[in-house]
Image: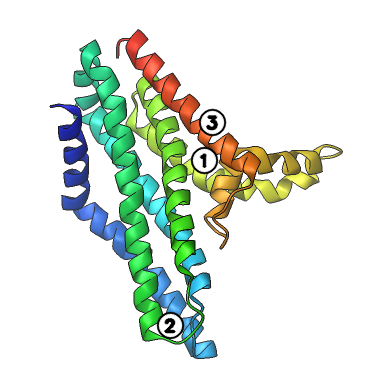
């Protein structure tokens, strides 16, 4: 199986899995309920509010798809098979990067289509086109950062339970702990301010906001973090047997 075949297999296994459609149903159902309640209260639906609510659900769903490809490679022996030959190792990492980007494109397309359908049915302020492109770039960076981080852990400790738990912890638990940081005596506020430059914090925070743009420093830190994670993954797979 070459790299492109692995990408194809990642996409095929994601599309054909019943769990994918269950996750999609569980993601869209709350958004539909949210829309119905909102329309009942105000007779309209602000597309920006719906997009903001949907971005959290879809970012989590996309990350679960990425985690599924990792845990599947571990449980089915695909990871070990690729690591047996050094010539396959770099191709494996590149294939996974392509798969992550495609997953980000898919979840962005579904969320965009959902918001456009709702906007076409109910009255309210529509989302500007450029905001959908901001969402696309954000989802790509979000999934690449967390995806490459989780793949690195999978290479070091190929345990499916660890990968799943770590992914959920980073996206769900860490953000909920942030509001309690100011309670730390003397240094709490400083820690919270510094999180504006920590990808774990601001990437996750943007999934619940309507702003998907970055400051210059956040752009630099995010891209640099992804490049560093990619290089570390490449270095690790070329130097260590799995």
> Is the residue marked by circle 1 packed among few (<14), some (14-19), or many (20+) residues within 10 Å?
some
**Label annotation for residue 224:** 3
Tag 2, which secondary structure?
A: helix
> Which secondary structure lies at badge 3?
helix
Which of the pair 216/68 is nearer the observer? 216
Reading the image, the residue beneath label 1 is: 170
How many numbered marks does the figure carry?
3
Q: Residue at x 58, y 51 (%)?
A: 205
Q: Position of residue 31 (x, y in %)?
A: 42, 71
**Relative height, residue 54 to residue 196 (above, below):** below
Q: Which residue is mark 2?
A: 36
**Does residue 2 appear left or right of residue 128 in this picture?**
left
Asked if marks 1 and 3 touch (Cβ < 8 Å), the reply is no
How far apart in space, not on screen, are marks 2 and 3 (Cα)?
Answer: 41 Å
Question: Residue shown at 72%/39% (left/top)?
Answer: 194
In this view, 125 is above or below 206: below
Q: Position of residue 172 (x, y in %)?
A: 52, 48
Find the residue positioned furthest to the left: 1
Q: Residue 90: give x, y in percent of width and height.
A: 29, 20
The crowding category of the residue bearing disc 2, from other C-alpha atoms within 10 Å (few below 14, some 14 to 19, many at least 20), is some
Image quarter in which the C terminus is found: top left
Residue 148: quarter of image = top left
Mark 1, secondary structure of its residue? helix
Horizontal arrangement in the rendering, residue 183 relative to residue 179 (left or right): right
């Amino acid at each position: 199986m070459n790299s492109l075949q692995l990408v194809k297999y990642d996409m095929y296994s994601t599309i054909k899995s019943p769990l994918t459609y269950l996750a999609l149903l569980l993601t869209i159902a709350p958004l539909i309920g949210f829309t119905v309640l909102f329309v009942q209260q105000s007779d309209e639906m602000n597309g920006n509010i719906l997009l903001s609510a949907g971005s959290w659900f879809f970012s989590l769903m996309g990350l679960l798809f990425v985690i599924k490809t990792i845990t599947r490679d571990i449980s089915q022996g695909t990871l070990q098979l690729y690591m047996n030959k050094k010539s396959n190792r770099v191709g494996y990492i590149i294939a996974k990067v392509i798969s992550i980007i495609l997953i980000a494109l898919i979840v962005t397309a579904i969320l965009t289509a959902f918001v456009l359908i709702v906007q076409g049915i109910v009255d309210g302020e529509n989302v500007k086109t450029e905001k959908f492109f901001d969402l696309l770039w954000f989802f790509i960076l979000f999934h690449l950062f967390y995806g490459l981080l989780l793949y690195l852990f999978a290479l070091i400790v190929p345990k499916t339970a660890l990968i799943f738990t770590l992914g959920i912890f980073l996206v769900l638990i860490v953000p909920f702990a942030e509001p309690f940081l100011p309670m730390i005596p003397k240094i709490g506020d400083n820690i919270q301010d510094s999180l504006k430059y920590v990808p774990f914090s601001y990437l996750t925070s943007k999934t619940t906001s309507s702003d998907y743009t970055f400051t210059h420093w956040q752009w630099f830190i995010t891209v640099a973090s992804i490049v560093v994670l990619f290089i570390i993954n490449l270095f690790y797979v070329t130097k260590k047997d799995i």
